[in-house]
């Protein structure tokens, strides 16, 4: 409990919003209530242990970055956590500066990943818009081919039935001459 409160105090002082829980089950509720940017979890927790909790969190959000803390020299557990998908691990004892540096690095990477996701969505939206424009242009070209859109005197004109097809052919002709 003292370590959890020390982390909360340290990270709040660093400008982070911190939500804590003394148990794995409680940690899962925190994640379900609002997806955090990062989870730091101790392997040794009452009830559900840290690795089991991590696996459940991973089921909720596979890309949620998790730093697993484990006792000094317990690299086997740290390696297991990494194999399960943990972003990083930190061995106890550690310095506050080391923890803060790792947290800052994870959060910077998370921000880049989220921005990348936003850019990919924007790219997809733009590609769909280009495809829609392309379909409209193909439709105008198809209609324009039905008409004589370039007169012999060099002026653009649209011959054919009145209505939308004439307007589209006329618009196509003006775009073509630009």
Image (cartoon, rainbow, N blue to C red):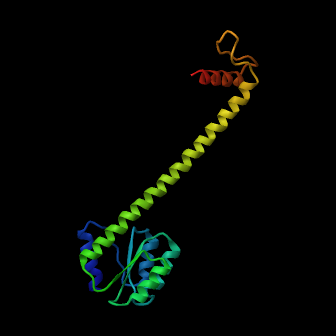
Q: Position of residue 154 (x, y in %)?
A: 65, 12
- Place of residue 114 in the rendered image (x, y in percent of width and height, measured from the top left): 44, 60
Looking at the picture, how far across and down is residue 104, in whole percent? 32, 67
- State which quadrant residue 169 falls in: top right
Q: Residue at x 70, y 17 (%)?
A: 158
Q: Which residue does the image show at 51% across and 73% down from the upper left?
A: 60
How many callouts does the rendering have? 0
Q: Residue furthest top?
A: 153
Judge left or right: residue 132 versus residue 102. right
Task: State the image coordinates of residue 8 (x, y, percent, origin top left).
Answer: 28, 76
From the viewer's perspective, is residue 36 above or below residue 75?
Answer: above
Could you tell me which quadrant the N terminus lies in? bottom left
Seen at 26% across and 70% down, the residue is 12
Q: Residue at x 67, y 9 (%)?
A: 153
In the rendered image of this protein, does residue 171 appear above or below residue 135? Answer: above
Say above or below: 38 vs 23.
above
């Amino acid at each position: 409990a003292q370590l959890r409160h020390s982390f909360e105090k340290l990270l709040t002082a660093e400008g982070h919003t911190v939500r804590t829980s003394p148990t794995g089950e409680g940690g899962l509720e925190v994640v379900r209530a609002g997806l955090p940017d990062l989870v730091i979890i101790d392997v040794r927790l009452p009830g559900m242990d840290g690795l089991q909790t991590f696996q459940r969190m991973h089921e909720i959000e596979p890309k949620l970055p998790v730093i697993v803390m484990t006792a000094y020299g317990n690299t086997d557990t740290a390696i297991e956590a990494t194999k399960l998908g943990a972003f990083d691990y930190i061995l106890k004892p550690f310095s506050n500066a080391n923890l803060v540096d790792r947290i800052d690095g994870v959060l910077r990477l998370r921000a880049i990943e989220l921005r990348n996701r936003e850019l990919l969505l924007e790219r997809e939206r733009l590609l769909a818009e280009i495809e829609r424009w392309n379909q409209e242009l193909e439709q105008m070209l198809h209609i324009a081919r039905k008409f004589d859109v370039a007169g012999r005197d060099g002026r653009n004109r649209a011959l054919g039935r009145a209505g939308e097809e004439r307007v589209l052919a006329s618009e196509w002709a003006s775009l073509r001459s630009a």
